[in-house]
Image (tube, rainbow, N blue to C red):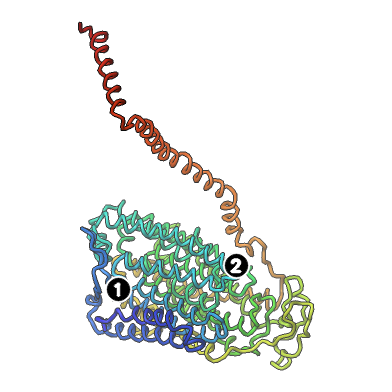
């Protein structure tokens, strides 16, 4: 199977080309099933490659498949080549596997859309780009996929482009990611200048061998980090991701929760020897950016009312955890949390899509409530996702998040201790805002009798959550003045949408088994499976913490993490379930600390004036100097050209005048008699 790893991107490429030509003819739902089958085929090939690698010795688990010479220019020799190793195949397995489930969900969610086949064309193109990104043997091939997922992000976020909000969100994502792309390109340029190649083997080998100066390694690592910050939505470039929720919910699940936004974490892990060779301040910077982003986004999530916006800010926060792990030298923990996050966040996004579908496209949680009786499968699976992200054992999120916190503290020093506390506070807030979401959507009292506005939501007829489904159906009296939809009945989603939820709920429950810690009650054969698998790739940069005091106290730290999660859940239940105190949701948090508004104000005010001043300088000074020189030459040439009349008598006269002037100069000027 290693010789045919090119089939992993080839199947979605075939799906894209087929839908491009025959998509309209296939129509709804055949185009969706065809696109899903192509992604399933990629997943099957990925499984085959995984077992091939597993059968090899640890140090032989790396295979390069070269398709053709892509850029043969003097010393710049770049192949279109794919790299199959534990890291790339881990990415391929969860990218293609989860993408397949999301394709199935989208068949039901997008049913009846007039651009049904085009949507799946874009989804297949995205999977193609993502597999190229993770399989690339060098930075340029990865950059091809990197730009591909960015383009698909624009297409899919603004899929319903007739809505100004969707169109604007798509452009915002595209433009913001260009800043990160600038950093990625500079890293490539600097790497080629220093080593003469952009191959991962060449760059990482040079870093491991000490062939790069600390300054060069630091420059490459920082530029790569800029690229990762843009793609993985970290401060200060996170602003595109919350707005990206304007796109269809399957897009939110696929691109902005499970795969695309994790590309930055993948890139930093792939280049971990370069981070190890860089100045220590680089890792510290990465850890602080991740920690601050995690806490910042979590504070915003506690006050959001849109069911998808809560999950969007949660994604930013969880990505912050991953960067905290990278900065702490815990690359296995970063990948572990990336995989478990893909399970439970895809589940939560698809669950929110199921709620939106059942609520007739309503997304305001203040107009929901008591849905667990009417949408039992959606509710049960969503609750599993909630427990996983909240960090409640034995669900997957607990194991990966706990490992990140352990590595953070074990790094040692005041900075590490502060970051550990930030991680704990973020975990508390995560449990709080996710419990709030579950209560507002599935428990409490029904507020879905009509689409009321913000002020009217509290005045709707309430229904006890303990009432049976029939009572819940009938009790909310229709309030015709509350919106154009009038009375409606929430309903469960079809099986094609529920099946992915059930599978993802199972993975969110058992996903922690991928990398169980070394506790005495866990059999040794079950411990650190992912760590052993990724060891050949991450060994140069991975921190070893077995001899630290934090590692010795890992049991107590795990109990502390559990207590923090339970405290967050209990606090949310007291506020939103039992209503012991009035909810505290400051408008500044609902407005995202007004960070986005500040950027918009700057761009629309001083920023625009600065851009206009630069444009004026370019037009009048730079272009003016160039154009002025050209005009001077043209004017002089035009004047001289008039002397060329073509008349012999004029030329003879000019020669005569010239002779007289020469004689005068010799006689008068030089004193020649």
Disc 2, SS: helix
Closest to the camera, between mark 1 and mark 2, is: 2
Using the image, determine if residue 332 lies above or below residue 413: below
Report the number of discs. 2
- Do we see residue 569 in this rendering? yes
The disc placed on residue 156 is none
Q: Seen in the image, is 589 located left or right of residue 134?
A: right
- Counting residues from the start of the chain, the first of labels 1 and 2 encountered is 2
Q: Is residue 312 left or right of residue 270?
A: right
Residues 8 and 550: in front is 8
Left or right: 576 with respect to 417? right
Q: Whole-Å distance between the Cαs marked 1 and 2?
A: 45 Å
The residue identified by callout 2 is 165
Residue at (63, 72) in percent of width and height: 306
Q: Residue at x 26, y 8 (%)?
A: 668
Q: 583 or 31, which is in the foreground?
A: 31
Q: Residue 7: horizontal and vertical position, in percent?
A: 31, 81
Which residue is at 77% across, 79% downward?
460
Q: Position of residue 276 (x, y in %)?
A: 32, 60
Label 2 neighbour load within 10 Å: few <14, some 14-19, many 20+: some
Mark 1: give few (<14), some (14-19) or many (20+) Cα within 10 Å. some
Q: Which residue is mark 1?
A: 535
Position in image of residue 156 (x %, y %): 50, 73
Secondary structure category for the residue under label 1? helix
Q: Nearer the viewer, residue 279 or 220?
A: 220
Quadrant position of residue 671:
top left
Q: Is residue 652 above or below residue 389?
A: above
* Residue 191 relative to residue 587: left or right: left
Q: Are marks 1 and 2 in contact (CB under 8 Å)?
A: no
């Amino acid at each position: 199977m290693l010789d045919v790893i090119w089939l992993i991107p080839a199947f979605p490429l075939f799906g894209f080309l087929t839908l491009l030509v025959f998509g309209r003819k296939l129509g709804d739902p055949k185009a969706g099933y065809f696109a899903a089958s192509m992604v399933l085929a990629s997943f099957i090939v990925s499984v085959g490659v995984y077992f091939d690698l597993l059968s090899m010795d640890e140090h032989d688990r790396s295979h390069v498949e070269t398709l053709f010479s892509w850029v043969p220019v003097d010393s710049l020799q770049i192949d279109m080549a794919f790299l199959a190793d534990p890291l790339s195949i881990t990415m391929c397995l969860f990218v293609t596997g989860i993408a397949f489930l999301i394709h199935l969900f989208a068949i039901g969610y997008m049913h009846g859309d007039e651009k049904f086949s085009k949507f799946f064309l874009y989804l297949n193109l995205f999977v193609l780009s993502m597999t190229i990104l993770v399989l690339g043997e060098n930075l340029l091939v990865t950059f091809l996929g990197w730009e591909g997922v960015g383009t698909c992000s624009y297409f899919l976020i603004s899929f319903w482009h007739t809505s100004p909000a969707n169109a604007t969100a798509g452009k915002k994502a595209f433009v913001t990611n260009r800043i990160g792309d600038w950093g990625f390109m500079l890293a490539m340029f600097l790497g080629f200048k220093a080593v003469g190649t952009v191959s991962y083997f060449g760059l990482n080998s040079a870093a491991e061998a000490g062939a790069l100066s600390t300054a060069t390694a630091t420059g490459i690592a920082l530029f790569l980090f800029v690229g990762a910050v843009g793609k993985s939505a970290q401060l200060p470039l996170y602003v595109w991701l919350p707005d990206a929720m304007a796109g269809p919910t399957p897009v939110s699940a696929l691109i902005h929760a499970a795969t695309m936004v994790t590309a930055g974490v993948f890139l930093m892990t792939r280049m971990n020897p370069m981070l190890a060779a860089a100045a220590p301040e680089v890792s510290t910077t990465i850890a602080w950016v991740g920690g601050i982003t995690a806490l910042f986004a979590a504070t915003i999530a506690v006050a959001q009312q849109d069911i998808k916006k809560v999950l969007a800010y949660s994604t930013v926060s969880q990505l912050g955890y991953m960067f905290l792990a990278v900065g702490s030298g815990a690359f296995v923990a970063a990948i572990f949390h990336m995989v478990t996050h893909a399970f439970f966040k895809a589940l939560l996004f698809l669950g929110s899509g199921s709620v939106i579908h059942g609520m007739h496209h309503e997304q305001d949680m203040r107009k929901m409530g008591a849905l667990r009786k009417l949408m039992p499968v959606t509710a049960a699976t969503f609750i599993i996702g909630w427990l996983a992200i909240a960090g409640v054992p034995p669900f997957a999120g607990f194991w990966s998040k706990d490992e990140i916190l352990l590595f953070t503290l074990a790094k040692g020093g005041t900075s590490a201790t502060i970051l550990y506390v930030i991680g704990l506070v973020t975990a508390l807030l995560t449990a709080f805002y996710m419990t709030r979401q579950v209560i507002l959507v599935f428990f409490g009292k029904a507020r879905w009798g009509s689409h009321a506005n913000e002020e009217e939501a509290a005045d709707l007829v309430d229904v006890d959550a303990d009432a049976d489904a029939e009572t819940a159906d009938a009790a909310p009296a229709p309030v015709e003045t509350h919106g154009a939809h009038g009375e409606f009945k929430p309903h469960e989603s079809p099986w094609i949408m529920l099946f992915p939820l059930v599978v993802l709920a199972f993975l969110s429950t058992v996903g922690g088994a991928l990398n169980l810690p070394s506790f005495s009650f866990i059999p040794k054969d079950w411990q650190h499976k992912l760590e052993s698998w990724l060891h050949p790739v991450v060994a140069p940069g991975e921190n070893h913490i077995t001899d630290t005091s934090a590692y010795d106290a890992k049991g107590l730290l795990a109990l502390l993490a559990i207590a923090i999660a339970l405290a967050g859940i209990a606090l949310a239940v007291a506020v939103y379930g039992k209503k012991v105190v009035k909810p505290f949701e400051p408008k500044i948090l609902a407005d995202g600390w007004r960070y986005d508004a500040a950027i918009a104000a700057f761009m629309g005010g001083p920023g625009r004036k600065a851009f206009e001043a630069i444009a004026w300088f370019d037009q009048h000074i730079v272009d003016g100097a160039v154009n002025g020189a050209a005009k001077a030459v043209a004017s002089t040439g035009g004047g001289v050209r008039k002397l060329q009349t073509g008349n012999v008598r004029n030329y003879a006269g000019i020669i005569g005048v010239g002779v007289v002037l020469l004689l005068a100069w010799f006689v008068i000027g030089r004193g020649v008699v």
